[in-house]
Image (cartoon, rainbow, N blue to C red):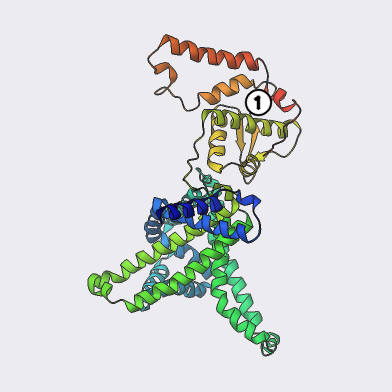
Amino acid sequence: MKHKLQELKAWLAAYVWEDDLRHLGGLRKVLVFFLRVLHMLFRELLGGQLNLRAMSLVYTTLLSLVPLLAVSFSVLKGFGVHTKIEPLLYNFMMPLGPKGIEVADRIISFVENVQVGVLGSVGFALLIYTVIALLQKIEAAFNFVWQIDHLRTMSQRFSNYLSVILVGPVLVFSALGLTATILNTELAQKLMSLEPLGTMVVYTGKLIPYLLVCLAFTFIYIFIPNTRVRLKAALVGGVIAGVLWETTGWGFATFIASSTKYAAIYSSFAILIMLLIWLYISWLILLVGSQIAYFVQYPKYMTLHRVRFALSNRLREHLALQIMCLVGTNHYFNKPPWNLDALIETLDLPGEPVHRVIAILIDAGYLIEVGGEDPPVYLPVHDIGTMRLADLLADVRQAGENRVLNAEQLESIAAVHRVMSDIGDLYQDTLGARTLKDLVLSGDTSTSQ
């Protein structure tokens, strides 16, 4: 029996992990993708990182929820649709049962008592900063999922975040109000009286909460990570996370209604404990959906064993030359400059190592990041005809050294010193005076997978 189980395990591992998912098709591709996602999510949840990120977001949410709602409430109040925010909050707190309505009422009363006009410039700035800090924390969690090690710049945070906070709610509630107005017209009522159109409208109305949550999650997955997320990947993650969130909310509400032990143990603190648990579950589902979107966009990173995206010396040098070659080619032939997302897609590598090498090239004075574009683009700092390849590779090799930690501080061993010196001379002798321009004009600078 043990031998049979080992054979079954080996066959299952080969069936799920042996083939490249991008080369599969039909039902097997769907089944293999589903099994790989289950394995990866289970491994990520056991690894603790998604759990820790969700817990951190719970704490940040408690600190920033009232300021966030206050800013949105003030903007919506100016457009006369501030009453629309209350049903959304009630819907979010619904899994907590009757006590959830009480918590929502308390939050609404706090928000209504926040008088933005009397806060003063310093108080208003702190209010905005609290909201920006919440979204920055959310972005950091999503960037972790998407293997991105850098946040948006401060100017991008204020412009992007505030546009969503201030304009987003107005557009959403205006669209909902317009939809309700259209449905209440005489023509719409007559059309709904006809079958099967009327029945379809009724069932559609029951699906609208799921649809709105899925669309909201899809928008979050596209907008929040500091990278380009394809619509297909965000939509798959949004649909799965949205359905999971709505279904979990129903199950959590059933659990609250059927359990009286927690109230007996925690007394008046029970609702606070339940709120923390519900916030944790909500953030965890949101991060799980983002992880699914990441796997949809980059299926080759679903591996049986955890992979560390650490660059070897050889790969770092190779990658630096490839990036400089691509940037130099477009600059020399007056083509559109490269941005980070385009480089990631072309090089077919995760975002973190690519950005890490770009940061090395910027620090060494070979590239400059031009922020006038969104996203920013990269250009050579000097004429590519003056950038010697030997100097470029030498700077990439010694990247990260500083006055505290460098090769000169090592105890000198004559034999080792001669070997390292010979290696450096070999670079110089092999590459000679060849420059980046010579590499660009060498004939073939196209990428091949």
Can residue 105 be seen in the rendering of this structure? no
Q: Residues within 10 Å of mark 1 (few under 14, many from 20)?
A: few
Q: Quadrant of the N terminus?
A: bottom left
> In the rendered image of this protein, does residue 341 appear above or below residue 433?
below
Question: Left of 262 or right of it: where is 346?
Answer: right
Q: Residue 15, position in %: x, y?
A: 55, 53
Question: Left of 187 or right of it: where is 203?
Answer: left
Q: Residue 81, position in %: x, y?
A: 54, 73
Q: Residue 136, position in %: x, y?
A: 47, 51
Can residue 206 be seen in the rendering of this structure? yes
Q: Residue at x 38, y 56 (%)?
A: 55
> In the rendered image of this protein, does residue 163 appear above or below residue 183?
above
Describe the element under mark 1 as helix, strand or loop: loop
Q: Residue at x 52, y 70 (%)?
A: 77
Q: Quadrant of the C terminus?
A: top right
Q: Which residue is mark 1?
A: 382
Question: Left of 440 or right of it: where is 304?
Answer: left
Between 198 and 236, the one nearer to me in the picture? 236
Q: Residue at x 48, y 75 (%)?
A: 87
